[in-house]
Image: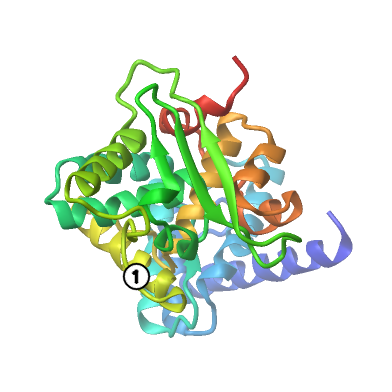
Amino acid sequence: MNDSTADRYDGQWRGFAAYCGARGVSALPASTATVVTFVGHLWRSGRVVAASLKPIMAAIRKRHVAAGFSNPCDDEGVREAKAGFCRAGLDLRPVHKLRRLPLPAAVAWRLADLASRSPPARRRHLTAVVMQFWWMRRAGDITRLTLGDVDPRVDGSTHYKVPRHKTEVATGLLARSLPRDPGPHLDLPHVLLARLVIELRAAGRAPSARLFTSCAPPTASAVVTGWLRDGLRRLGVTPPVGTCYSSHSLKSGGATAANAVGVNRGAIAALSATTEVTLAANYISALCIPSVFDRYFFARLLPR
């Protein structure tokens, strides 16, 4: 521990000790109840924000451990008090910008399942949401798709064409393919796309017909975000306090899930039209807990 960190912890410990002394309770060792009431005191004082609780609790923990006592902060009551502090702080203090989270693959799979059971219009919208996650593309790439751009084949493979991005040398469409899923489960993303294509062809739609929407490119992100949030609301899924899910969450969620299952970063970059450096900085979350649903989407990209 460097000197500045030690000084900061020492100051935070002195604040806790002064609080205990003024109330005639023991600071070392402190009881869990004392720590809980101290958290409440910090909230009522209005001088401490939720982010400051972590180093304050760390100072109390370190002083107890160094003295050979158990950590009074390691208790469900303290964790609940800290969570309440955070929730209350966000409710009462303005949040200028919510942090966008990658959508977990488990939630994306639930959205795919919801789509399979939904009326045609909602199924079409949720299929677009699932495609953006699966293909790790921008919302504008998905909303611009035409019927002629996609080819979900009977062998289980999926072929599609998406726009090149302005950062690429060439212009026009870029062909991409995903092999069939090797698992025994129903390949929901492929099935949803194939179902939509069959329905549109049966309705006599031309290959140039837009697949999901005729919205203008500048509105694509807002449109897909609206479809995503409608699906999440129907599933009862809400993001943690201070965060949100948006169309950006779909591309970042897909890239995060592909990375979690072990897909090569170069392959993720090629599919998502994003450099590996940008993926690491803006899209892939190292905090993701891997799940079987990552494999449902991306095991097809692993070596066989």
Residue ID for mark 1: 223
Residue 178 percent location from the top left of the image: 51, 33
Q: How many marks do you count on the picture? A: 1
Residue closest to the eye, 109 or 168: 168
- Tag 1: amino acid: Val
Q: Residue at x 31, y 65 (%)?
A: 213
Residue closest to the eye, 2 or 244: 244
| Residue 178 vertical placement versus 24 (above, below) | above
Q: How is the image coloured?
A: rainbow
Residue 296 percent location from the top left of the image: 41, 29
User: In the rendered view, does 101 fall on the left or right side of 286?
Assistant: left
Quadrant in the rendering for residue 217 = bottom left
Q: Residue at x 33, y 70 (%)?
A: 214
Residue closest to the eye, 108 or 272: 272
Q: Is residue 133 visible?
A: yes
User: In the rendered view, does 125 fall on the left or right side of 241?
Assistant: left
| Residue 174 vertical placement versus 152 (above, below) | below
Residue 191 percent location from the top left of the image: 29, 34
Q: Quadrant of the N terminus?
A: bottom right
Could you classify mark 1 by the number of other residues whose Cα lies within 10 Å: few (under 14), some (14-19), or many (20 or more)?
Answer: many
